Amino acid sequence: MSKFFATPVRDASTAVADYFVPANAPFSCLVKKGESVRIVDLEGQQAVDTLFYRADDFSERYSSQDTLRVQGSAYVSTGTKLISSEGNLMLTVTADTCGRHDTSAGACSCEANTVRFGHQVKYLHACRENFVIEVMKHGMSKRDVVPNINFFMNVPVEPSGELAIVDGISGPGDYVELKAEMDVLLVISNCPQINNPCNGFNPTPIQVLVFAGEEG
């Protein structure tokens, strides 16, 4: 693992919920205020496209623009405060063993894949489709899919200001942990991209753990 540890460093066996998310799959769960969610890259180099919605009002959701503006940094890591579309604090990153998470490049889509890689990839599955499948389970539609975080995705900013998608730096077992500052719906697309190196051209499964909040 990398050396970006931050407190708390928890024992996975103490989690109150433990989910296995297969390669290419969508996923969602509720994380209550005070609880912490850990996203684990089980095999390494796996981009995890992620969105958050306020649990009692889905019209308030993660804002990549406000998160970047408030923290003044291009990347998400320990200490980053995730800000909502209403300017409220949704979650705080409390632990990170990878050190590089993107919130600028957005999610892959069938349309974007076609433009970037050719018409032969038009029908390959993509993150936007995963997001639409998952948010529909909660009464939302594709209009509710907004710019997301890409945990474990390595997107350096070039001197020209352009974004580059390169090999991920996360290793097997690397994780990021976030404390919920409000009740949130977590929505994930475990990225199925095979045409660029964000997944090492080989999508793999992840683990999602939820830890109870501290008492008192």
Image: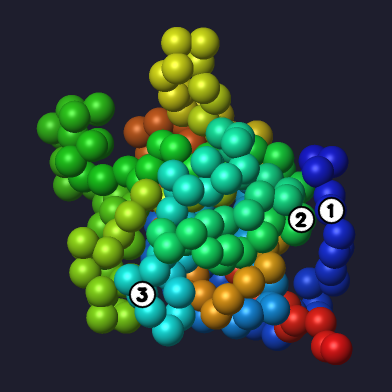
Give the SS element for disc 1.
Answer: loop
Q: Dot 3: within a 10 Å radius of its alpha carbon, few (fewer than 14), some, or many (20 or more) residues?
A: some
Task: Single out the residue that lies furthest toward the top.
Answer: 160
Q: Relative to residue 160, is residue 147 depicted above or below?
A: below
- Picture quadrant of residue 38: bottom right
Task: Single out the residue that lies furthest toward the bottom.
Answer: 216
Q: Relative to residue 94, is residue 109 depicted above or below?
A: above
Query: Disc 3 vs disc 1: Cβ atoms closer than 8 Å?
Result: no
Give the SS element for disc 3.
Answer: loop
x, y percent for residue 109: 26, 45
Give the SS element for disc 2.
Answer: strand
Q: Residue at x 69, y 78 (%)?
A: 34
Query: Disc 1 vs disc 2: Cβ atoms closer than 8 Å?
Result: yes
On-image quarter of the C terminus: bottom right
Q: CA–CA distance between discs 3 and 1?
A: 30 Å
x, y percent for residue 156: 54, 25
Which one is nearer the viewer's eye here, 144 or 120? 144
Which one is nearer the viewer's eye here, 183 or 170? 183
Q: Is residue 3 visible?
A: yes
Amino acid carrying label 1: it is Ala
Q: Which residue is mark 3?
A: 58
Amino acid carrying label 2: it is Ala
Amino acid carrying label 3: it is Phe
x, y percent for residue 68: 53, 41
Q: Relative to residue 142, is residue 78 depicted above or below?
A: above
Q: Residue at x 63, y 54 (%)?
A: 81
Who comes first in sequence, dot 3 or dot 1?
1
Which one is nearer the viewer's eye here, 206 or 83? 83
Who comes first in sequence, dot 2 or dot 3?
3
Q: Which residue is mark 1?
A: 6
What number is the disc on residue 95? Answer: 2
Q: CA–CA distance between discs 2 and 3?
A: 26 Å
